Image (tube, rainbow, N blue to C red):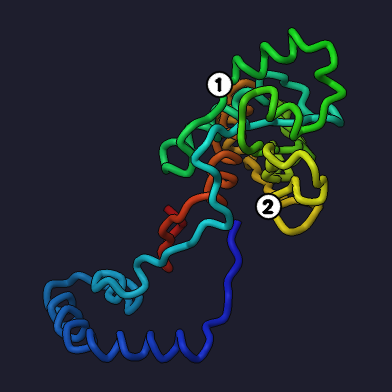
Amino acid sequence: MGTGSARGPAASSEWARALRRVLPYALSISAWAWTTGCGYSGGKLLYMLGIGRESNVKAEFRLTSGPILILVDDVDERVDWPVAKYYIADELAQQLLRHKAAKRIVPHRTLQQLRQSDTDFQGRGCREVGELAGAQQVLWLQVQEFLAQEDISDASNAAYLAVVVKVINVLERDNRTRVRLWPGSSDGRLVAVQLAGDEVVRLGGVDAIARELARRIASTVGRLFYDYRADDFGTAS
């Protein structure tokens, strides 16, 4: 889900200068396309010439190069397909490592062992869990909404997942107000994804639906922590 933004004077001037530079080439290509029967819109011609093709979207926050614990928290028990929490953590770990947004992710089995061996685990705070797991930061996802079922009641919003994202500084033990590294708001960063009815039908089965929701939330959350390129005539890459 994206939002548009108005271009300021500086951006408009830059666009105009770029247009003047390539206009002779654009006219030549346009004439060639017309004579050969290949129709291109003005936007497509500019895209072919590289104008507006790619823009850099900067990371909102840079994660540490040290160990990171991905903690998917479901205090309100919204997730009725428990393995979905593992899918979310696993997909996000792969996303961060693949794009070099993180160098080390605490293995999921470490968290499982803590849950089983630590009798006080449920009462511990996020920072403390991260410390016990040997992490420097916790990437904390708090589940707000989750729906993954085969029975479709709303064709436009048949399955969905919403999480609040925060980054916690495990190394900060003395000042509780400085434990949260990102975002600036104590409410965290809300991220949501959904599947339409035809997608749910195509996936066929709760497990497949949960996996796809996890993949999409991981892709969206992951992009908060690394630079990526988006184009003006298509979707972000």
Identify the residue position indicated by label 1 in the image. 107
Q: Secondary structure at mark 1?
A: loop
Look at the picture and state if 110 lies above or below 166: above
Please give the name of the residue rendered at 22% of the width and 84% of the height, measured from the top-left corner. 22
Q: Earlier in the sequence, mark 2 or mark 1?
A: 1
Q: Kindly identify the amino acid type of the residue bearing the numbered disc 1.
A: Pro
**x, y percent for residue 140:** 70, 38
**x, y percent for residue 102:** 49, 39
Which residue appears farthest toward the front when viewing the image? 174
Q: Is residue 88 visible?
A: no
| 229 to the left or right of 201 | left
Badge 1: residue crowd in 10 Å (few <14, some 14–19, many ≥20): some
Look at the picture and state if 158 lies above or below 19: above
Which residue appears farthest toward the top when viewing the image? 117
Please give the name of the residue rendered at 80% of the width and 53% of the height, measured from the top-left corner. 186
Please give the name of the residue rendered at 76% of the width and 36% of the height, measured from the top-left corner. 143
Identify the residue position indicated by label 2 in the image. 182
Look at the picture and state if 192 lies above or below 137: below
Badge 2: residue crowd in 10 Å (few <14, some 14–19, many ≥20): many
Q: Secondary structure at mark 2?
A: strand
Q: Is residue 114 visible?
A: yes
> Is label 2 in contact with label 1 (beta carbons under 8 Å)?
no
Quarter occupied by the N terminus: bottom right
**x, y percent for residue 6:** 57, 81
Cα distance in 3D space between marks 2 and 1: 23 Å
Displayed quadrant of residue 4? bottom right
Given residues 121 and 93, the one toward you in this image is 121
Please give the name of the residue rendered at 63% of the width and 32% of the height, measured from the top-left corner. 70
| 100 to the left or right of 202 | left
**x, y percent for residue 9:** 50, 91
Q: Kindly identify the amino acid type of the residue bearing the numbered disc 2.
A: Trp
